[in-house]
Image (cartoon, rainbow, N blue to C red):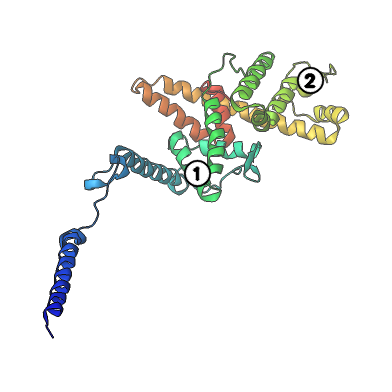
Amino acid sequence: MSDRPASLFVVSVAGLCLLVGIVAWRLAPSATHVARPAEPRFTEWRDNPFAAGVPSDAAAYNEAASHEAEAAAARVARLWVDGSLRGTDLDGDWGTWAGDRLQPGLSLRRRFDYLLTGTGEVEPAELRHWIEQQLTLERGIDAARQVLDIWDRYLSLQQRRFETAWKPDDPASWAGVMAERSKVRRDVLGAPWAQAFYADEERDLAALAARRGAPPTDGAAPPPSLLTPDAVRQTPELQAARTARFGAEGAERLRAEDLAWARWEQQIADARAALQAIAQRPELSAPQREQARLDELARRFSGPELQRAHAILLSVAP
């Protein structure tokens, strides 16, 4: 029997295996290609802000802004360490909240006024950074944005220049003063916030105007002699007349208000004389003179009284 067919079969199988091996070798990726990792592809430079170790403009700006916010917050924090707020507690609060929405309330203005007493030692922008940081930690970024919106409007109102001058010694002019300020407050803050921040103050000023001689809206004016603030006239006869007209509690309140008003007017008179002395110092430049005026008022007044002193003596909106 011949072996030729078997030999041909073996040769054919060997050839087929060799062909398959060659094809597989040609199609297989090289070792170099397999070991090389895929290179990242970026459509823009900003997609890889730290490529080659160089941050993008946006990344550099964000980092600088973050550092500045931290530095500003640290400067404000020092007010309670060795600044004018040393030994004091935060006045007011961060407002009344209904769920996650800030509601108008006077307590937020009290906190703003308290923080603004640090102006001169820190800048308003630094106070803003501090507020943002505190609110973000306590209530989140959305709450911080709501409070900062009111802060920005309130600060704008403080920097507003009014056409009608405030004249403490001219009660007849107070109606125009109150009307202008009331309108501007509502324009800047919105009616709900203006009402929350200033309703008590406007009511008290209207009552004081009536006491100083302006006719009340109901036409029933008490005798001016019973209402005129005059600490010198605190006599038993005056107190008896007030008690008969307003009752014992009302008479006592009037007596206390008279004394407080007299003290306030004396403080303002003393501060005005000190500011006039500063204005006459020829060695001071204009910026130095202005800073000296601010320092003098900060030395004599604090809290809301400092804001009112600014309004009266530096022509800043009350």
Q: Which of 80 and 33 is in front in this view?
A: 33
Drawn side of residue 244 relative to residue 252, left or right: right
Q: Which of 231 and 131 is in front in this view?
A: 131
The residue sitting at the front extreme is 1
Rounded to the nearest whole Å, what is the CA distance between mark 2 and mark 1? Answer: 42 Å
Residue occupied by mark 1: 85
**Where's residue 144, x and y in %?**
53, 42
| Residue 204, visible in the rendered structure | yes
Callout 2: few (<14), some (14-19), or many (20+) C-alpha neighbours within 10 Å?
some
Drawn side of residue 42 relative to residue 111, left or right: left
Q: Work out which quarter of the rendered image holds the C terminus and state it.
A: top right
Drawn side of residue 18 relative to residue 90, left or right: left
Residue 92 quadrant: top right
Instruction: Please name the residue shown 47% across and 20% down the image.
Output: 276
The residue sitting at the right extreme is 244
User: Regarding mark 2 in the picture, which secondary structure is present there?
Assistant: helix
User: Regarding mark 1 in the picture, which secondary structure is present there?
Assistant: loop
Residue occupied by mark 2: 225
Instruction: Please name the residue shown 44% across and 35% down the image.
Output: 125
**Where's residue 18, x and y in %?**
14, 69
Which amino acid type corresponds to the residue marked 1 in the rendered image?
Answer: Leu
